[in-house]
Amino acid sequence: MGITDMAQPDGPSRQSRLTYTDGTSRIVYATEREVAFPQGHLIVSRTDLAGIITHANDAFVEMSGYTREELIGAPHHILRHPDMPKLAFKSLWDDVATGKKWHGYVKNLRKDGAFYWVYATAVPNIRNGNIVGYTSVRRKPSRGKINELIPVYQQWLDQESTAS
Amino acid sequence: MTLKFLIAPDFSPERFAGWHMLNTTLQRRSGLRLHLVTPVSANEQSEALARDQIDLVYANPFDAVDMIRTKGYQPFARPKQRFDEMVIATGAGSDIAALEDLKPGCRIALTENRDVKLIGLRLLEPADLTESLIEWVRVDSYQAAARKALKGEVDAAFFLADAYASLTQLTRNQLRILVESAIHDISHVLLVHPQSLAELPALGTAFLEIGKSTGDAELLAALGLVHGFEAMDQEQAEFMIDLMDTLMD
């Protein structure tokens, strides 16, 4: 079962319909308001093998705008921002499912439509030789790197839009 | 039989008496004989671990990774509400107003504490600074790091947050914090050697009950672990290790 459409925020926002890798889709709203990553903190979450959130630390709850109860049990793509091209996540699941670490700069969507940039790392949780879930840690990114990536992500989005 | 109890060498010198008090208390309550091993450096610790069977370790979280995953040590407790955080500070009169003012070629003082360096490097990422862009100035103590920062001999210094808090008020007044980590998920860990697991019930009980008896508050204050210890199982330790793995690069 997919997640429900976002509530439209007050003020100007862009509406998009996002379709996720599990085949579900929902309407999201994005505003131009950026929320600064809290200095010195890490955003930490864990998911099961299907990408369902099983753990959220306080920084994750605060930055996402959702309550912990809303996050636990939700798919991690609840944070997916419409400005993020699919290509940026292309190797994520392939890497972690084969025991590798994945890094990437990600623009995340908050519950209120605002956004925050992170440098994300995901690792598989390997117990007794088996992958039982995934841990993702997001830290404060370099602004220079983000500024380099914004036009690249836009180009990828345009290509995806042309191809579809 | 006497069990060897190794304490990671990253505690402040004024805690030394506290660890001896703890050792005495643990022996009395567990009925076990414990010999305290207090290496003064990471190298000495490695040598002690390679040379002897160390039965009980109060391990730095980064050293605990190898001990748990490679050597089979079993985690059983950790200090309660006491996390390993770090501080990056500059001299109070420095022109460095924010982390982003640190530029390639800047000089940063640090001790040999590897976890402080690792977390510090992650905190410097927003300033586009990587390890090779920094001129590192090695010092023997956090006091020496503070002196170099307040005299302007370095642009910034790395501190274990506890060590920074232990500096005198006069010293701290001459420093300015640029950033303090608030990770909350990384802490020291108590580990038992796989061949000493038979002693774990007595050891675990002795550790977890510290704080319940008269006089324990003074002991915990001397250790700087005022909330005592709490149980930590294998999965909680594995979670911490996975988290640290994400910080390695």
Image (cartoon, rainbow, N blue to C red):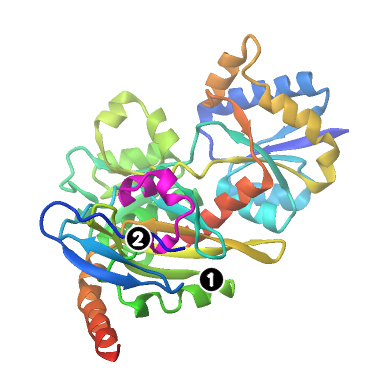
Could you say where residue B35 lies in the image, as x and y percent from the top left?
76, 31
Could you say where residue B233 lies in the image, as x and y percent from the top left?
67, 42
Q: Nearer the viewer, residue B236 or B97?
A: B236
Residue A131 sits in which quadrant?
A: bottom right
Which residue lies at the image location 26% right of the left edge and 80% below the top edge?
A157
Q: Are marks 1 and 2 in contact (CB under 8 Å)?
A: no
Quadrant assignment for the C terminus of chain A? bottom left
Which residue lies at the image location 22% right of the left edge and 62% below the top edge?
A29
Which residue lies at the image location 35% right of the left edge and 26% below the top edge?
B168
Q: Nearer the viewer, residue B205 or B108?
A: B205
Q: Are marks 1 and 2 on the same chain?
A: yes
> Of helix, strand and loop, which one carries label 1?
helix
Q: Please name the amino acid that badge 2 sits on.
A: Leu
> Of helix, strand and loop, which one carries label 2?
helix
Examine the structure image and report whether residue B31 is included in the region drawn in magenta. Answer: no
Q: How many marks?
A: 2
Residue placed under numbered mark 1 in the picture: A96
- N-terminal-most mark, 1 or 2: 2
Q: Nearer the viewer, residue B126 or A51?
A: A51
Could you say where residue A110 lies in the image, as x and y percent from the top left?
28, 55
Mark 1 neighbour density, 10 Å: few (under 14) some (14–19) many (20 or more): some
**What is the number of the mark on residue A79?**
2
Asked whether residue B105 appears in the rendered view, the answer is no
Q: Is residue B134 above or below residue B2?
A: below
Image check: B49 left or right of A11?
Answer: right
Could you say where residue B237 lies in the image, as x and y percent from the top left?
62, 47
Image check: B92 left or right of B72?
Answer: left
The magenta span reads: A60-78
Q: Chain of mark 2?
A: A
Which residue lies at the image location 15% right of the left edge and 47% below the top edge?
B95
Asked whether residue A122 appears in the rendered view, the answer is yes
Residue B41 sits in which quadrant?
A: top right
